[in-house]
Image (tube, rainbow, N blue to C red):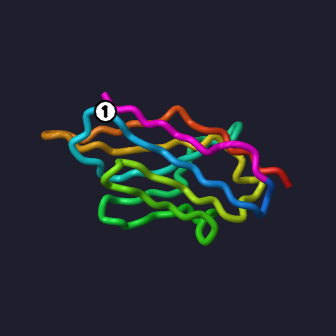
Amino acid sequence: QVQLVESGGGLVQSGLSLRLSCAASGTILSVNVMGWYRQAPGKERELVATMTRGGSTNYADSVKGRFTIGRDNARNSVYLEMNSPKPEDTAVYYCNANIRYSTYDMDYWGKGTLVTVSS
């Protein structure tokens, strides 16, 4: 069983910075892609940013140039540095990890951390 635990959410003023962190624990052979998704009230969950084990990144257009994703493969952890957040970035942020086992891969999700950006 794998658990993802997020931390770092909260209230932040627009234009400042906030850092989200997530650590995976449990029976882990290897972690493929790790990333962050978010879900605003009344909207579907959407991709924010992902990073492969090799360091390739993918960002939503809405956060490019403002958010930075990074990971520590040795610690099976990922972070999201949110610079100059906007009120429209307000959402529950979920950590995601694709775990590789011997014959299959499986996706895991954290419980989410709420980020509220005030204007």
Q: Is 67 located above or below residue 91 in the figure?
A: below
Q: How far across and how far down the image is residue 55, in percent?
A: 36, 66
In the rendered image, the residue lying farthest to the left is 102
Magenta stretch?
1-12
Identified at 40% across, 51% down, the residue is 34
Screen quadrant of the N terminus: top left
**Residue at mark 1:** 26
Identified at 33% across, 45% down, the residue is 98
Q: Is residue 16 left or right of residue 109?
A: right
In the rendered image, the residue lying farthest to the right is 119
Q: Is residue 11 magenta?
A: yes
The crowding category of the residue bearing disc 1, from other C-alpha atoms within 10 Å (few below 14, some 14 to 19, many at least 20), is few
In the rendered image, the residue lying farthest to the front is 75
Identity, as a three-letter code, of the amino acid under mark 1: Gly
Q: Secondary structure at mark 1?
A: strand
Q: Is residue 119 left or right of residue 111?
A: right
In the rendered image, the residue lying farthest to the bottom is 65
Q: Nearer the viewer, residue 106 or 84?
A: 84
Count of numbered circles on the image: 1
Q: How far across and how far down the image is residue 12, in percent?
A: 76, 51
Q: How far across and how far down the image is residue 54, in percent?
A: 30, 64
Q: Nearer the viewer, residue 75 or 78?
A: 75
Identified at 70% across, 42% down, the residue is 10
Q: How far across and how far down the image is residue 70, in percent?
A: 46, 61
